[in-house]
């Protein structure tokens, strides 16, 4: 049943997250470059002047066409008050990072010709629904390799001077769309480890590529606890996370840690590659919220993992799958760095076993530890890959990991902040009224087929997969504390 629930979640993500593309370059619309201040903070002592972003819906600020959910009501209801291509009610990770750095949010690549002046702050190449490889979540959306190609072309066109990359930071986000595609296409349990490994390996390749381009610091986000997303927890009335889904994130994050560690060990620049632990951030927030309600600490992530883990570890193909993913990430990171970006940041996978998509099964009360285990494994390999990239780079710390796993965990547990979200914390603010509908859905009569909470600022999740602006604010508060301690 765990496996069936996971498959149902992944298939539903394909429907929910991103309808099929008809025209990737057809994105127009306003872009304000908001949320700017001078004298920003630093990332492990590094103060970049430009920010380049690669990845998916956790970082996308308007690259997708207007047929996608991010451009539909009620998205953007909190900020800027209307839909502008963000997969939230307001600001997302990219904008909080830019604000912290004292920069304007980098202009979306699709709007570059209309906002040329904003290019001096960097550029956002992230597309919602994309992955390290091609995905079924958003057919035709540029994967990470293609996004880096866009960046490389801009350098060739002299749209961005390579000399400026020495004072730049690159953010790389990977939120699990590759794994959604793997299962949606009939991938076997035996092959999961090898595929996750392949994804992480490619992430490492990408990180190194970005760093080799000249980017000083490359930060990658760990995958969030996928089993705690509303899309998963709705089957439990948002009461419990799905451990099978979280196992994906754990495995991914474990491999990611190894990959990032390897990158750093091979890089001459100390700490060029870093991980943003979204998994731990999500997990901490979810479990702290439970603690304030007299529940035992960690109860949301109290797992059936010891029993479920044998399902994954008993199959030889699973580790290699994750290795493949992390290896590709490393390839991408190196590619970006080789282009001249001084710092490349990659996101660790968040604890996706805590996403509403999984926790719906237990009324949003409990995360799924099996799924979170996968995220942890991915992030572990990513750490190794980033460490290797850094060891091979001539610039200290060129590659950085944004630990979204740890950030999500901290937020969900409310360990790092006094903010307390409404209970159950796993329940999203906006979701479809029945199967087949999502946040923003309308029926043939134009009637709303979704419910919307009264106060998005009191909820952590916006829809079945994405945090609210308030959720992202607390997650970034956690990440920022890590930057300042190092």
Image (spheres, grey):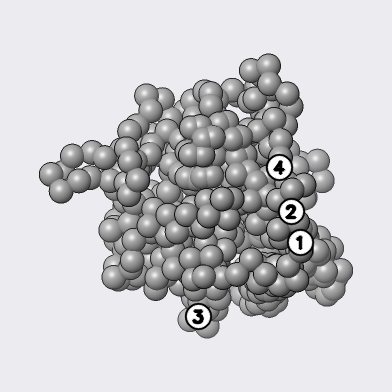
Please state the horizontal and vertical placement of residue 51, each as a whole percent of the image. 58, 58
Q: From what the image shows, is residue 297 above or below residue 294?
A: below
Residue that carries the numbered disc 4 in the rendered image:
304
The alpha-carbon separation of the residues under discs 1 and 3 comes to 42 Å
Mark 1 or 3: the one toward you:
1
How crowded pointer 2 is (Cα within 10 Å; few <14, some 14-19, many 20+) is rated as: some
The reply to whether callout 2 and callout 1 are in contact (CB within 8 Å) is yes
In this figure, which residue is indicated by the disc labeled 3?
153
> In the image, what residue occupies the spot 74% across and 48% down?
307
For numbered disc 3, what is the local secondary structure?
Answer: helix
Label of residue 309 in the image: 2
Residue 365: tell me if it is visible.
Answer: yes
**Position in image of residue 280 (x %, y %):** 70, 43
Residue 248 in picture, x, y percent from top left:
65, 57
Rounded to the nearest angstrom, the CA distance separating label 4 from label 1 is 15 Å
Instruction: Give the side of residue 447 with respect to residue 194, left or right.
Output: left
* Residue ID for mark 1: 313
Instruction: Tell me the element at label 1.
Output: helix
Q: Mark 1 or 3 closer to N-term?
A: 3
């Amino acid at each position: 049943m765990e496996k069936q629930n996971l498959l149902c979640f992944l298939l539903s993500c394909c429907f929910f997250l991103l309808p099929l593309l008809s025209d990737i370059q057809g994105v127009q619309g306003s872009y304000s470059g908001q949320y700017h201040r001078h004298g920003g903070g630093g990332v492990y002592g590094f103060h970049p002047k430009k920010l380049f972003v690669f990845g998916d819906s956790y970082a996308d600020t308007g690259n997708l066409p207007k047929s996608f959910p991010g451009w539909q009501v009620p998205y953007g209801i909190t900020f800027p008050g209307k839909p502008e291509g963000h997969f939230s009610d307001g600001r997302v990770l990219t904008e909080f990072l830019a604000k912290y750095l004292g920069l304007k949010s980098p202009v979306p690549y699709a709007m570059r010709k209309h906002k040329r002046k904003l290019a001096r702050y960097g550029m956002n190449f992230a597309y919602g629904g994309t992955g390290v490889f091609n995905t079924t979540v958003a057919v035709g959306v540029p994967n990470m390799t293609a996004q880096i190609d866009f960046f490389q072309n801009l350098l060739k066109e002299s749209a961005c001077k390579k000399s400026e990359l020495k004072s730049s930071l690159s953010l790389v986000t990977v939120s699990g769309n590759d794994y959604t595609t793997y299962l949606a296409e009939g991938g076997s349990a035996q092959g999961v480890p090898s595929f996750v490994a392949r994804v992480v390996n490619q992430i490492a390749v990408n990180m190194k590529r970005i760093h080799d381009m000249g980017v000083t610091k490359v930060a990658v986000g760990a995958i969030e606890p996928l089993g705690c997303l509303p899309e998963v927890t709705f089957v439990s009335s948002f009461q419990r996370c799905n451990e099978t889904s979280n196992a994906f994130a754990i495995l991914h994050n474990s491999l990611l840690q190894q990959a990032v560690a390897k990158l750093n060990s091979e890089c001459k620049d100390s700490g060029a590659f870093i991980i943003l632990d979204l998994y731990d951030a999500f997990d901490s927030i979810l479990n702290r919220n439970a603690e304030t309600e007299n529940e035992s600490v960690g109860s949301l992530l109290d797992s059936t993992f010891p029993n479920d883990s044998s399902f994954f570890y008993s199959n030889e193909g699973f580790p290699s799958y994750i290795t493949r993913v992390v290896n590709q990430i490393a390839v991408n990171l190196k590619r970006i760095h080789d282009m001249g970006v001084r710092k490349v940041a990659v996101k660790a996978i968040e604890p996706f076993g805590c996403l509403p998509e999984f926790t719906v099964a237990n009324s949003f009360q409990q995360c799924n530890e099996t799924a979170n285990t996968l995220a942890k494994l991915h992030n572990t390999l990513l750490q190794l890959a980033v460490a290797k990239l850094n060891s091979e780079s001539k610039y200290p710390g060129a590659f950085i990991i944004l630990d979204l796993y740890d950030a999500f965990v901290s937020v969900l547990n409310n360990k790092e902040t006094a903010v307390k979200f409404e209970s159950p914390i796993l329940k999203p603010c906006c979701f479809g009224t029945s199967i087949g509908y999502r946040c923003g859905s309308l029926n043939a009569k134009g009637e709303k087929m979704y419910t919307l909470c009264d106060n998005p600022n009191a909820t952590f999740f916006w829809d079945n997969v994405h945090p609210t602006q308030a959720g992202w604010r607390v997650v970034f508060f956690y990440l920022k504390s890590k930057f300042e301690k190092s």
